[in-house]
Image: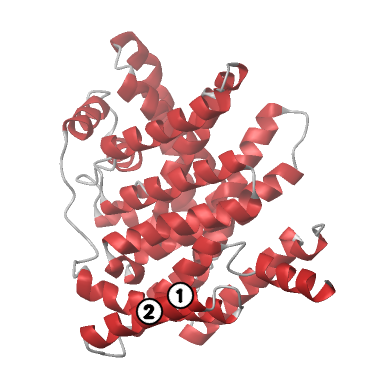
Amino acid sequence: MDANRTFARRRDTSIGRLPMAWILLFTAGGVIASRYIALPAGFLAGGFLIAILMAFATIRHRIAEWYIAAALLLFGMQLPMLRPQPAYAPQQANALHEAASDRIRRLGLSADSEALALAMAVGDQTELTAERRAPYNRTGTAHVLAVSGLHVGMVFLYANALLCWLTLLHRGHLLRNIAAILFIWLFAVTAGLSPGTVRAAMMFSALQLALATTSNYTSANVLAAAAFCMLLWRPSYLFHLGFQLSFLSVAAILFWGLPIHRRLRTRWSLLNGASGMILVGLAASIATTPLVSHVFGTIPLAGIIANPPVILLTYGVVGISLIWTIIPWPPLGVVIRPLLETLLSLQDGLVSAVAASPHAAVEYRMTAAQMAVSYLFFVIFTLIMWHPWRKKR
């Protein structure tokens, strides 16, 4: 009897408890292996079928998990052959995106402010020159200039805040989650449906579903399921920097930003909102720093200082821009224009001042081993933070 309980506990902490996380892990491992090991398609398909049959034959024994893992690895190695697609596709124009860009231009902002507003709010970077980007690159705040996980995350927070009244209705929680996901995808369409925006929308849709379940382990499964579906569609996403940054950002928000925010909640709603915005952005920035250092060869030290206020200003820019793109009422523009101009001037001035410091960034490229050690530390920190061993059996 005791042996059976021990075995059940072990299974509870492995594939049985985190099925999608394990499925993603081994499938992604197979996709990576396919880059270095070339095996015949027939051999991979035959090995996959044998592993599945052996898993069914040993379903009552722990060895079945190893057969499932082998099957997933072989499946991952076949994916690039089954879905030989490029990681990126050109952005497609649509009526909502063009209308939103036109409404921002009708505000009559200064040239610099208009370029920033178009890029940050509707994903239109046609007026964003290299000169305007330079201070943001140096300070590690360039991520605010392209609609990505941060911006979709802002829409995610805005949608949940604005729709909180739905919880008062019958089945209100269900309505709130559905409406928030629709709002996220409406913003993605308005931002031009670039691959990065679609990735972020999928990730935050998964996060919305994960939060609806109120289960820590289910949250990990839903997030892993979103990444797995993206790999099924395009296995080459796994090697694209945008996919990696999006996944790391959302995982950090889910496992660091939101839990820490809950623990630091106060009785003041405005303070809670501001701290939540900052913690979400800070968690995403920390989680992506090793990868950014490895790829770009720089660690923006000033980002730790510059990102919180810049992200806070970005929340204002995105929120006000959304109001204007939804309600382009001329009298409202009299209020919107000076507000946007002020926020964007403050943001640009802050970034330029920080970028002028000789210590704003360190030119350092992490090796692959150093990056791996950094993320191993992050994983250990996350496990300690969640205290999984303290849960009651």
Say if 72 sits above or below 247 in the image: below
Q: Are marks 2 and 1 in contact (CB under 8 Å)?
A: yes
**Percent from the top left, x then y, of residue 259?**
68, 49
In this rendering, does residue 224 appear at all? yes
**Percent from the top left, x then y, of residue 248?**
49, 61
Which residue is found at the position 62% from the left and 41% from the top? Answer: 276
Say if 67 sits above or below 359 in the image: below
In this rendering, does residue 302 appear at all? no
Looking at the image, which is closer to me, 16 or 137? 16
Amino acid type at circle 2 is Gly
Q: Quadrant of the N terminus?
A: bottom right
Looking at the rendered structure, which numbered label has been put on residue 30?
2
Which residue is found at the position 52% from the left and 23% from the top? Answer: 163
**Crowd class of label 2 (few under 14; some 14 to 19; many from 20; radius 10 Å):** many
Which residue is found at the position 53% from the left and 56% from the top? Answer: 221
Q: Is residue 77 left or right of residue 349?
A: left
Looking at the rendered structure, which numbered label has been put on residue 26?
1
